[in-house]
Image (cartoon, helix red, strand yellow):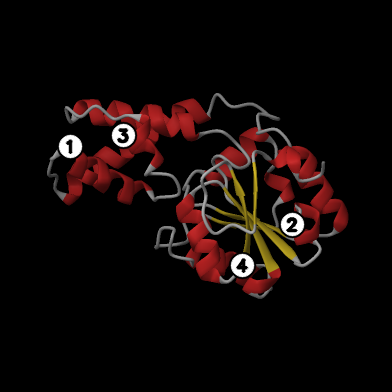
Amino acid sequence: MKNAINLLGEIKGVIFDLDGVLVDTAVFHFQAWKRLAQELGFEFTEIENEQLKGVSRIASLEKILNWAGAEASESEKKDMAERKNSWYLDLVLQMKVGEVLPGSMELLHWLKQKGYPIALGSASKNAPLILEKTGIFSFFDVIVDGNVVTLSKPDPEVFLKAASELQLLPEECLVFEDAQAGVDAARAAGMKVIGIGSGLQGTDLSISSLKEVLN
């Protein structure tokens, strides 16, 4: 069974998802979506929240409207998405330097020392702000987020664009992901993938956190 160091020895660049991999802002998304769902008369739980991992803001909103049995015009959807994002950003703005998941900072330092180019591949439109607030922006050579891609995971667009901007072939990249949609996107892109958390299918390796990579 290969470990993370073995896999890193087979590739030339690394692509990270953001939420649930490097930082824990998933709880902020949950709180903001729950608040919006309550306005729609729908009790949003962690069960539904799991289905939104790696999914874009508008696609997530569509799911919530469907679960709530609600309809909305395009302008109403835009207003809902903006309100949700405002609530989410209020929480993000309270984040501090070093507020990253265990093992994140150590791994980023190690990858830089070894000369690996590093990209972010995230559906989040707030990725640059989160990276700045937590003090890890400077580690990234490339940032591909919801501001520059149009298709949500499991479509491989975000990872293929990241590889292209790193000037690497897809098969030369390793992805770190915590959501099944992200794992499927990495696979569709032809990349190796390390899954963080349990129950993910199709990974080359599964770990509980980034702390395990260098241990």
Mark number, residue 191: 4
Q: Of callouts 1 and 2, which one flags the residue occurring earlier in the amino acid sequence?
A: 2
Can you say which quadrant of the picture contains the C terminus? top right
Residue 86, given in percent of the width and then of the height, sits at: 38, 33
Mark 1 or 3, which is nearer the eye?
Answer: 1
Is residue 146 visible from the viewing direction of this image?
A: no
Alpha carbon separation for disc pair 3 and 4: 36 Å
The circle on residue 1 is 2
| Mark 4 closeness class: few <14, some 14–19, many ≥20 residues within 10 Å | many
- Give whichever of discs 2 and 3 has the lower sequence position: 2
Q: Position of residue 94 (x, y in %)?
A: 55, 24
Q: Amino acid at mark 2?
A: Met
Q: Is the residue under label 4 in contact with that under label 2 (CB below 8 Å)?
A: no
Q: Which residue is mark 1?
A: 68
* Residue 211 placement: quadrant: top right
Q: Secondary structure at mark 2?
A: loop
